[in-house]
Amino acid sequence: MTPLTLAEVEAVARAAHEGQTDKAGRPYAEHLAAVAEGVRARGGDPEQIAAAWLHDAVEDDALSREWLAAAALTPRTKALVDALTKRPGEEPEAYARRILATPGASLVKEADLAHNADPRRLAVLDGPTRERLTEKYARMRALLGL
């Protein structure tokens, strides 16, 4: 099976998140595009960029674990997406350990955190939400040694 191209992965991710918005009310695909670009800018390879497009798809129930298992993606891309998918009730420490144990996943998470913690994105949120998310992202960066 020939793996999906990056353009095809992007199209799948955009379709999966169609109609979803982020906490600021922006189309969710903007976040995915920013993370993919962040991975590219940090020297990430095509598999990491593909994982950036798909990093929230299973976690947000936009795509199923079964879809991921059967998808025309490389085993490494699947492993990256799996590593970046937070499990229900999972402690941040366990999530960080899985990311660190999966080669290439921390670069994708670094790009994700950088976009999530962008002061321009956080500025439009209410104070308590902004404070909670700022602390959450800082804690994850610390757990990942970023």
Image: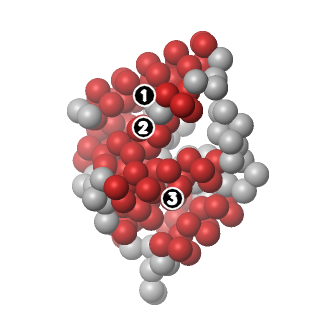
The earlier-in-sequence mark between 2 and 3 is: 3
**Residue 142: x percent and y percent?**
29, 27
Q: Residues within 10 Å of mark 3 (few under 14, many from 20)?
A: many
Q: In this rendering, is residue 68 above or below 18?
A: below
Q: Where is residue 145 in the image (x, y as percent from the top left)?
A: 23, 33
Q: State if disc 1 and disc 2 touch (CB < 8 Å).
A: yes
Q: Mark 2 points at which residue?
A: 113
Residue identified by numbered label 3: 53
Position of residue 22 in the picture relative to residue 36 (left or right): right
Q: Is mark 2 on a helix, strand or loop?
A: helix
The quarter of the displayed image where residue 121 is located? top right
Residue tagged 1: 137
Looking at the rendered structure, the kind of residue marked 2 is Leu
Q: Which of marks 2 and 1 is nearer the N terminus?
A: 2
Q: What element carries label 3?
A: helix
Q: Residues within 10 Å of mark 2 (few under 14, many from 20)?
A: some
Q: Are marks 2 and 3 in contact (CB under 8 Å)?
A: no
Q: Tell me the residue at 42%/48% (across/down).
A: 84
Q: How crowded is mark 1: few (under 14 residues within 10 Å), some or many (20 or more)?
A: some
Left or right of 80 on screen, residue 122: right
Decide: is 69 above or below 105: below
Outermost residue, right side: 19
Residue 55: x and y in percent read 49, 52
Work out whether residue 96 or residue 25 is closer to the camera in this orientation and state it.
Answer: 25
Q: Residue at x 54, y 36 (%)?
A: 88
The span from disc 2 to disc 1 (Cα, nearest Å) is 6 Å
Whether residue 89 is visible to the viewer of this picture, yes or no, is no
Q: Name the outermost residue toward the top.
A: 128
Name the amino acid, label 3: Trp
For marks 3 and 1, the one nearer the N-term is 3
